[in-house]
Image: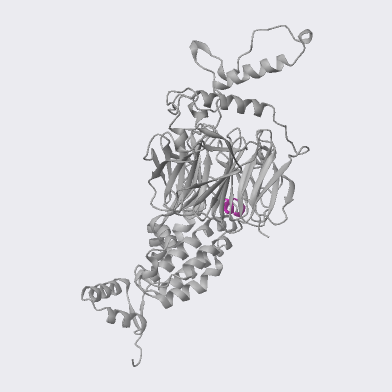
Amino acid sequence: MGETVDTTLSEQEYAVLLKILRKQNLKETEEVLRREAGISLASNDGLGANDKSNPTFYQRGYESFLTFVEKSLDLYRSELAQLLYPIFVHLYLNLVARGYPDIARQFFASHHGKQESFYDHDLVRLQAVTQPEHMQGCELVENLRRNKHLVHLCTESYQTLTNYLQSHQLTMILNVIEERMTIEVVDGAPRNRLDLLNKAGATGGEASHTANKSKVLYGVPRDPIMATAIAQLEEEELESIPDDERPKKKKPKKDPSLQSGKRGKSVAVPHAPQLSRLPLPKPREDEVQAKVKAFKEAARCTSLSPSNLPSICFYSILNSKNSLCAVSLSDDATLLAGCFDDSLIRIWTLTPKKLLSMKPPSQLATIPLSAEDIMDRILDTSSNNDVITLTGHSGPVYSTSFSPDKSLLLSASEDGTVRLWSLLTHGSLLCFRGHNYPIWCVEFSPLGFYFATSSYDRTTRLWSTDHIQPLKILAGHYSDVECLKFHPNGNYIATGSCDLSVRLWDILNGQCVRIFTGHKASILVLAFSPDGRYLASSGADCTIRVWDLSLAVLVCEFKRHQDTVHSLVFSRDGTLLASGGMDQCVILWDTSVFEEEQRRKNASTEGLLSRFPTKSTPIHKLHFTRKNLLLAVGPYTS
């Protein structure tokens, strides 16, 4: 083009010039002035109010901000460093959106290596976004642009930041903070790097300071049906004692959780919701008997401890290395359901009792509908199946769940539907539609009647077996919801997402009452302790984190797995936590460290009790039976 002329303009003059050029649609002239004419601003560092219009300033502006953070006082440096990643990402996306791919690549190459290592996965995906059209349809970019990144700063750190930005006129940084970020100023001293890392990594940043202030009723109330079970159990124990050794009959003691207080008010279990908080239908007689049986079996369970570890029984599913998607077991551990990528569901019996099928139609027609024992008469007692196959979905099945009374089965599929199956007739009863994308997880409530689903569409939905439409839609995650788990009292649902956050929802009002951040990869599995106080989460980052729902804090962190964790389960008495995954081993953890870690207020890798490697089988599912025998299931891979 000839000799370059170095022209210096004031900020006002530069802004007016650009305004005129854009108004007259002289884009080519604007590009020439920027790239070849050597126009600069007459400000103290060339990064003034109009730096957003000049892409070459992005590099200098970010380097200036990076230098500021690195030279900050040690007291504030860790908190200020939280801003480096979101500012870097949005400056890069701004360059791409404005059509400067070469400058964007240079900017990315210069600074992506300076970000925290746990952002590497996202940065690899962002590196492929180099044109404006690449941003459309990219889930990560949509999440970053749609949702503001939340950062907590103490008052002193925030004041240091604002003083620097204003004195250096870094308008482009200020614009990113105002448009794409939320800075929440909190009282107290600056946090150290360890505390910050424990909460870093989520797509949306940390949880809001007020997000975890709601009261959570984490206790598990005693069901009145259990009073009947307790009375029957005491009577059976009394009958087993010889007549001459039986104690004199005394007035039976009532369960404290069922006693009445003053003025007829019931004495509730501490921190537990009222039994009437959620509307539930009157239980059927068979449901009552199932609950009584479950209580009796649980009352005779083996007590576990660090010195008394459970026995482990492993089930390997043959010829399913690449086809098995998920596994579930009934609460009494008599049935096992496998989900497969060929749209089929297979149910195995784990006891000598065979699976019965229905009689043929010709025989069913002869059975009177008014017969009291009609359910027994429609079954073919001559059938002796070890496995039954359910067909109905039109895509891979990703999750199944047995009802508490073992009469129903739910299945979720890539076809976006949930099917309700009868385990008596082995037929599909209902097909629930509502999600627009694949459904990753489905689970029955421990109370029965209700169930929940989580999907690629970023929502969790609450359903009931008597309604074809969802009762509530729980929305708030920034990415697809990979897993969910009902609280033992049935009043809350925990969800884990690819946005690297765990949320706890109150299903009565649909409100999010807890947000936990700190995982560095997708969260794939959740588990509640039997008393309902603790929530364990894990997934692709191979780390198990345990959260206290009452205090809304991280109480423990375990880091002994070498690959993705797919299953977590607490023992029936809550003394042990078992985990398993793709590293082909089962690990047992001591839960007594929770209280100790809670007092220390920091994470730890203590608590490992034992590690049991398999020969060549990844762990898809772990389950403690009612007698505290640990079952493990996975596909045989050799």
* Image: magenta residue range: 193-198
- Residue 27 can be seen, yes or no: yes
Give the image quarter of residue 337.
top right
Q: State the predominant SS element of the stretch in magenta.
A: helix
Q: Where 270 falls versus 94 (above or below)? A: above
Residue 566 coordinates in the image, percent (x, y): 60, 51
Residue 280 coordinates in the image, percent (x, y): 44, 27
Give the image quarter of residue 77.
bottom right
> Position of 531 compared to 378: left or right?
right
Foreground residue among 564 and 105: 564
Count the marks: how many?
0
Residue 335 is inside the magenta segment:
no
Residue 176 coordinates in the image, percent (x, y): 40, 61
Q: Quadrant where the N terminus lies?
A: bottom left
- Residue 190 can be seen, yes or no: no
> Position of 624 compared to 262: left or right?
right
Foreground residue among 86 and 572: 572
Outermost residue toward the bottom in this view: 2
Q: Quadrant where the C terminus lies?
A: bottom right
**Protein image colouring:** one colour
Residue 329 coordinates in the image, percent (x, y): 59, 41
What residue is at 48 percent from the left and 27 percent from the top?
374
Foreground residue among 56 and 297: 297
Foreground residue among 339 and 609: 339
Residue 195 is inside the magenta segment:
yes
Outermost residue toward the left in this view: 24
Give the image quarter of residue 244.
top right
What residue is at 71 percent from the left and 46 percent from the top?
606
